[in-house]
Each structure stands twice: as structure tokens, then as C-alpha cells.
Amino acid sequence: MTGAGTTEGARERWLPLAVVPAAALGVLVAVILARGETDPPDSGLRAVADLAAATILGLGVVLLVGATSRHVDDTRAWRAVVVTAATWCVTEAALLLLGAARSQGVVASDLTTAGFADYLGGVVGGRLGAAVVLITALLAAGAVVVVRTGADVSGVLVVVPVGVAVVMRPITGHLGQQAFGAPMIALHVLAASVWLGVLLALALTLRSRGGWAEMLPRYSRAAGWCVGIVVITGVVAAAGRLGSVSALVADGYGRLVLAKAALAVLLVAGGWWRRRTWVATIGDHRTPAPVSVRRAVAECALMAVAFGVASTLATTG
């Protein structure tokens, strides 16, 4: 019986990684729909970076909200921050390198030190990318210190820098140049990250029925607001970028918007069903923790597919 419990516990720990292949599937579908109008390497790296960012933001929120809860394992949460921050840092560094090479009109292997320095100092995307790499590196290093020392550190020190880093790149894009574009896209990205990240963070940190009974209803209420913000800002952004209904099928960007909208409908329908079943009964403490973890990861996996499409959308022009 102990062996079976150990195996199940190991499976629970690795299960959240299912979001990675799910995001890869989203990127693959989006690249096919875009028909050559996007850059697959950039899209793939961007999807990994976006997933890592959402996860860290979610971990910070869980650390903050669950500061007084005996069910939230702070050590497990900070260890997850170490891994995800390091992953985010590496992928952002790779994106920075690809961006510099693209700005110089060369492949990454032919990029010179001088060309890279010019990109970092003279291009907005380079400066912002470097700032994100620095933030994530400092966050990973700080999380290592917390894990090693067992220090009691507030989740605010995760949420604030990650929130800033998450919106840095999107607000400088095409939509950010429109009237009210920057705050709108910032809200969209933050709401989407919280929607996915907090649920994934719960799957990473909660291992008891009581923990899920305490934290899931809180997440469900917040998720409702996130869904509303994501849908409203997404519709406004798409309308401003496309300009016509025909572009939804004639343009690669438009086809990705349709795919993202279809996934959003599935997520909203699934969320409604989960709220009527899983969330409604979680307070009875009858749902085993492994079942809650599997349900959370399944929902996060579908969200990760949408993240993969969204990441490709961001690199489609």
C-alpha cells in the first residue's frame, strides 16, 4: 500500500508538466493555421516563457493568499519558483538572442557581440528583453536563498516583479500603440496568467482534501473575473487589429483569433461545468486530493493549448 501511495505521489508531482506538451500542441496548430505568417522557433519559446511566467505569478498569488493557511506548502511553492524562474530566464535569453539576430538580418550563430550590444542598447525590444532576463534571474536566485534558508518571505516579492515582467513586452506591441491599448493588453495578459497560473500553482502545492476545499472556491471566484476580463479585452483587441470580418478567414492572424476564440468557448463551458460539480462539492471533503490535482491539470492543459495559440498570435504579423 505504501508503494502504491509513493507511486501516486510521484505521479501527482510530475502531472502538472502536462501543460508543456499541451502548449506545444497549441503552437503546432497555430503555425499550421497561420500558413507561414509566423516564426515557429519564436512561437515555441514564447509559449514556454508565457507558461513559466503564468506559473510563477500563480505561485506568488498562492503564497500571498495562503500565507495564513496550514495547507499551502511554502517550501514546495518556492522550489517550483526556482525551476520556473530559471526556465523563464533561459527562454527569455534565447528570445533576446533571436530578436537581436533578426534585427541585424543574420542567423543567431552569425550574430556579433557588437550587434547584440546595439540591440540591447538601441532597440526597445532589446532593453525590455534584457530587463525581463534580469528580473527572472534575480527571482530564481532569490528563490534558491529562500529554499535553502527557510526564510519567511511574502508572496508580494514574487507577484510584483513578475506582474511587471509579464506586461513589459506586450504593451510595446502594435496594440500598445493604440488609444488605451497598453492598459487593455496589460489587463488581458495579467488576467490570462492568473487564470492559468493560480490553478496550476494549486496543483503544484496542495496535497490534501482540506487544502483544495479551502483554496479552490477562492480561485473559482477570482477565475470568473479573469474570464470576463480576458474575453472583453480579447474581443476589443481583435477588432482593433483585424479591421474587417473577412480577415477572420483570409488572414493568418484572423484564423488564429478564431482558434483562440473557440478554445475560450470550450474553457468557459468547462469552467461552468466544473463550478457546478467539482467546486460545488469540494467543501464536503469527499473529493480525494489526487482527483482534484488531475482535474486541475486537465483544465490547465486546455488553457495551455490556448496559451500556445496566443503565443503564436503574438509573433504573427
Image: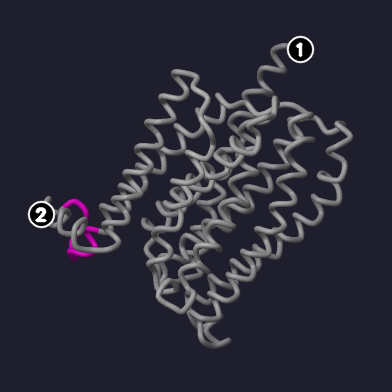
> Which residue occupies 73% across, 44% down?
218
Q: Which residue is mark 2?
A: 114
- Looking at the image, residue 29 sits to the left or right of residue 122; the answer is right
- Looking at the image, residue 238 sits to the left or right of residue 40; the answer is right
Q: Which residue is mark 1?
A: 1
* Circle 2: residue type: Ala
- Is most of the magenta stretch helix, strand or loop? helix
> Which residue occupies 48% across, 44% down?
52
- Looking at the image, residue 259 sits to the left or right of residue 27; the answer is right
Q: Which mark is residue 258?
A: none
State whether residue 55 is above or below residue 264: above
> Which residue occupies 38% across, 42% down?
136
Q: Could you say where residue 290 lies in the image, as x and y percent from the top left?
A: 73, 30
Residue 5 highlighted magenta (yes or no): no
Q: Nearer the viewer, residue 117 or 105?
A: 117
Q: Nearer the viewer, residue 82 or 28?
A: 82
Q: Which residues are magenta?
A: 100-109
> Which residue occupies 80% across, 30% down?
288
Q: Could you say where residue 198 lies in the image, as x and y percent from the top left?
A: 62, 44
**Please, what secondary structure does the residue beneath circle 2 have?**
helix
Q: Could you say where residue 292 lies in the image, as x and y percent from the top left?
A: 75, 36
* Circle 1: residue type: Met
Label 1, residues with CA under 10 Å away: few <14, some 14-19, many ≥20: few
Q: Quadrant of the N terminus?
A: top right
Q: How is the image coloured?
A: one colour
